[in-house]
Image: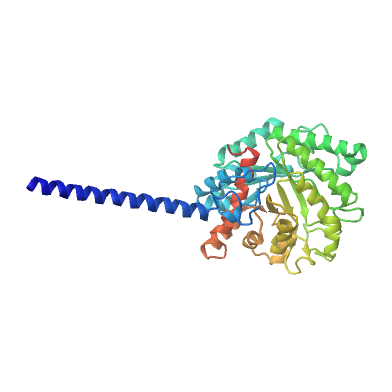
Amino acid sequence: MKFEKKRVGLMKKWVICVLAVLLILLGSCQNREDVSKSLGAEQQGSSGVKPPAGQSSHSALYPQEWEDHGIFSASYEKAYLLLQSMTLEEKAGQIFQVRCPQEGEEIEQISAYYPGGYVLFGKDFQGKTKEQVSAAIQSYQKASKIPMLMATDEEGGEIVRISSNPNLAEQRFLSPQQAYQNGGLNGIRADALSKAALLKKLGVNVNLAPVCDVSTNPGDYIYNRTLGQGAEETAEFVAAVVASMNEEGISSTLKHFPGYGNNADTHTGIANDQREYSQFEQVDFVPFQRGIQAGAQCVLVSHNIVRCMDKQYPASLSPKVHDVLRQELGFTGVIVTDDLAMGAIRDYTGGNNPAVQALLAGNDMLMVDDPAEYVKAILNGIADGTISQKTLDRAVFRVLAWKYQMGLIQ
């Protein structure tokens, strides 16, 4: 009798345990379903729009509102997974394209601030051999936990960071105007392919070009750096450069959005653009649109105050200008500021650090000289709630997706 009671008691306990396990499993499934929905696991966004042909349709791990079926969409899941493993300090560093510091300080800066990339200027190439430049860049990459964007301005003509050194190139690259006059679009393509091959050999993976600004007046500040032709010819030039660079695995940067026009030099002070919005729609936007269609992965925003879009803020600090680039032109890649150390920003902010405002405006990367104070400003902005964690994560997400798309991160 006692044995029978004991057996019944054991059976009751066993049934209770089984029921408990089943309830836990059911709850876990429901939780996974809820998490999946909250992170956008459905293949289509809330609008029900399907990805364009040739772009991925996938079960996303990242927040659904981040799914723009954009240029980096095939790398979104990997980028989001990496994002989850990063510290706040690593995330803050990734949004900066930093002017490469004095020789001997590069590795220390990488270890301290985790920059997303270096911008290399003439001093970083001057007097060096190809082997020396390549070895230096490789040492930066080796020191960085996350591979870096290595960028330079090799526009041709006046702005040639690399080919000004005869050890690195037989001759300086021609200006866009000269290359176009000599060989038309075929000359532009050949020139772009030559630039891309040189950059790739040295370890540079981003060219801060082409200049998309439309200027036909030799008196304009920006004229010598442009094609010197109308909107349509400039658009064809931009598309040819982007396609040629992509062919060699080098990323292009369309600049200077929303179009420089006849404005003054923002390196030295504030420039106010008084033109009507129709001028931008009919002329200035055209080369940017064509470059985006050709697969440009980055757009650089100028410091001009473009009054028809935003009377208060320079373009680089203006949410309205960034909305135009995202919503009107449909750009889904990385947006980077022009150098925040330039006179236009210094004069506008009165010397105050512009990093927080630049990130909140919609930039994914900020181009700066010394990262210390800029990174500190971002971290303080997160700490006091001025910047949401989601805002920072969204920018880093795009930067990481870009790096995956380029094959920098395996």
The answer to whether 183 appears left or right of 197 in the picture is right
The image position of residue 337, as x and y in percent, is 70, 55
Name the image quarter holding the C terminus: top right
For image coordinates 73% across by 38% down, the residue present is 246
Nearer to us in this view, 74 or 305: 74
Residue farthest to the left, as pictured: 1
The answer to whether 170 appears left or right of 323 in the picture is right
Residue farthest to the bottom, as pictured: 312
The answer to whether 104 appears left or right of 266 in the picture is left
Eyeballing the image, is 175 above or below 214? above
Colouring: rainbow
Nearer to us in this view, 64 or 320: 64
The image position of residue 359, as x and y in percent, is 63, 59
Q: Quadrant of residue 183?
A: top right
Eyeballing the image, is 159 above or below 307? above
For image coordinates 38% across by 51% down, the residue present is 26
Nearer to us in this view, 306 or 69: 69
For image coordinates 63% across by 54% down, the residue present is 48
Tell me if I can see residue 23 in this picture.
yes
- The mark tally for this picture is 0
The image position of residue 372, as x and y in percent, is 59, 54
The image position of residue 263, as x and y in percent, is 84, 60
Tell me if I can see residue 172 in this picture.
no
